[in-house]
Image (spheres, coloured by chain):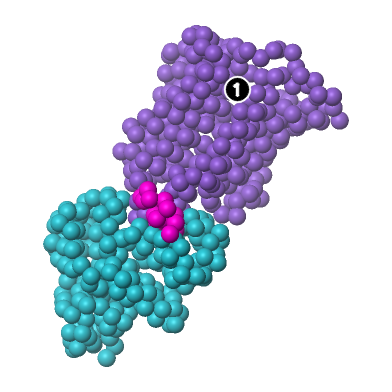
Chain colours: A purple, B cyan
Amino acid sequence: MAEFLQHCVNALVLGGTYALLGIGLTLIFGIMRVVNFTHGELYTFGAYMAFVLGSLLGLDFFLSLLLAATLGVALGAVIEFVLLRPLKGADIDTTMLVMIGAGIAMQASEQLTWGGVAKMVPHPFPPDPLVFGPVAVAPVRLFVLGVAVALLVAFYLLINRTRLGVAMRATFQDPDTAALMGVNKGLMYTLTFAIGSGLAAIAGALLAPIFLVYPTMGDLVSLKAFAIVILGGLGNIAGASIGGFVLAFVEEFGAGYLSSGYRDAMGFLLIIAVLILRPQGLFAAKERIG
Amino acid sequence: MLKLDGITVCYGQIPALRRVSLTVEEGELVTLIGANGAGKTTTLRAISGLLPLTEGSITFRGQSIGGAAPRVVLGQGIAHCPEGRRVFPQLSVRENLEMGAYLRRDHAAVKSDMERLFHRFPRLQERLQQAAGTLSGGEQQMLAIARALMSRPKLVLFDEPSLGLAPNLVEQTFAIVSDIRREGTTVLMVEQNAYAALDMCDRAYLLESGQVVQHGTGQALLANESIQKAYLGA
């Protein structure tokens, strides 16, 4: 039982950041119809920014997280503005190829700038785990979970309760009619990509002090983000949040009870099963944002 | 008030409109009639800025709006109630109406406008929190009209408001369009139901293959023999 609870706690911590990655990717696909292959690199970017700001520049840990997320938002806006905006109206294959190229270029730049040796990011939390009965959890992991959940809630409120959120959902459902209502589609796309990228960057920055930071860390994450999006149903934000936690639980329990060597494979086995049995996603009645 | 001067609009290489000119004066109800594919919807989409002009110009109250973005055209006071209603199916009725007032910053007035629309469309108030996609076709048309009015337009473009509605609802919809005009909003309407359109309008333009081939008062076109043959089934 203790072991079971411990796995649950670990899965929750991991699931929070998976959910952040998933909603960012699903938002971008849902509104822009862009399959974003730079998503994993934005995650890596966030982690490196946490390293630069926190470790190299010695900034306060919390401040460096905030800045890393902000820089992720800015980089996302630049990518949209420079690469995607000129491709307006191009088919999905073209944008996909461009995004694959951008992803490769970003990863190569990270390699060139930081070298292949993994970096560590310090954090100010005490190293001793907090013990709750049978379960132990490092304070930094609790912090990661707390921030992830807070961001998920904030994002939900943004999409469902604000004027911007309503305009985003309207653009997703019918871009032309949204334009007739006065929505600036170009601005909406830039914001969407920037917000999605910021979520990936903050996920990377949050996990940087737990895992190591290295140039290819985004590869697997990118694949997993796609897996989460497929689990939740394309464009389904609530589905992607839940999908993030589902993937984390499957990985954690698969690794814990079956074989830890197959941890990363567990998620993909799940995806294959979902694609065969329920290709529209676990939670999607139909494609939707919200 | 609105003046289209020789506009040409192409889909790819193929012209859908060829040098179309028309005018709408303040307070008028003008209709565009014609067969499927004649260019009626294209004309409205060009006015709204959804389609670029290949040549020609559009002016509205003395301002050039040809080639302007849809939000600029809307900001000048032209609302577009699109073909097939096009309500946002997964937004609530309230959110749809809020989208209609998206550019407005006078929140108190938006609220009172919404209240006023509820007098005209009580069903919308009953279904305020419901997703628009769950409304009946008639209710969706009422929502689409109300949404267009939420921007306080000076001119409303209606694209086939009667399309796909039961006969009693068709009548009701045309009555609403007439009411809107009577209250001082200028109307440019595209309609396949040529008889009803000509009967209620001040002036009408007949489009064939992307060109204006006839125009005149509604009554004059109703009396025109070739139009009776081709469009009124006489």
Q: Position of residue B25 (x, y in %)?
A: 18, 68
**Residue A61, quarter of the rendered image:** top right
Residue neighbourhood size for the residue with mark 1, other residues' Cα within 10 Å, grouped as few (<14), some (14–19), many (≥20) = many
Query: Residue B91: x, y in percent?
Result: 51, 55
- On screen, A221 above or below A191? above
Residue drawn at 36 percent across, 77 percent down: B174
**Where is residue A28 drawn, in percent x and y?**
47, 40
Q: Position of residue A83 (x, y in %)?
A: 35, 33
Amino acid at pointer 1? Leu
Q: Which residues are magenta?
A: B97-112
Q: Nearer the viewer, residue A123 or B2?
A: B2
User: Can you say which quadrant of the picture contains the C terminus of chain B?
Assistant: bottom left
Label 1 sits on residue: A207
Quadrant in the picture for the N terminus of chain B? bottom left
Q: Residue at x 59, y 36 (%)?
A: A152
Q: Secondary structure at mark 1?
A: helix
Q: Is residue B228 above or below residue A165?
A: below
Q: Residue at x 47, y 35 (%)?
A: A195
- Residue that protrudes farthest toward the right in the picture: A1
Q: Is residue B64 above or below residue A66?
A: below
Q: Does residue A53 appear anywhere in the picture?
A: yes
In this view, the residue farthest toward the bottom is: B234
Give the side of residue A78 with respect to residue A222, left or right.
left
Q: Is residue A2 magenta?
A: no
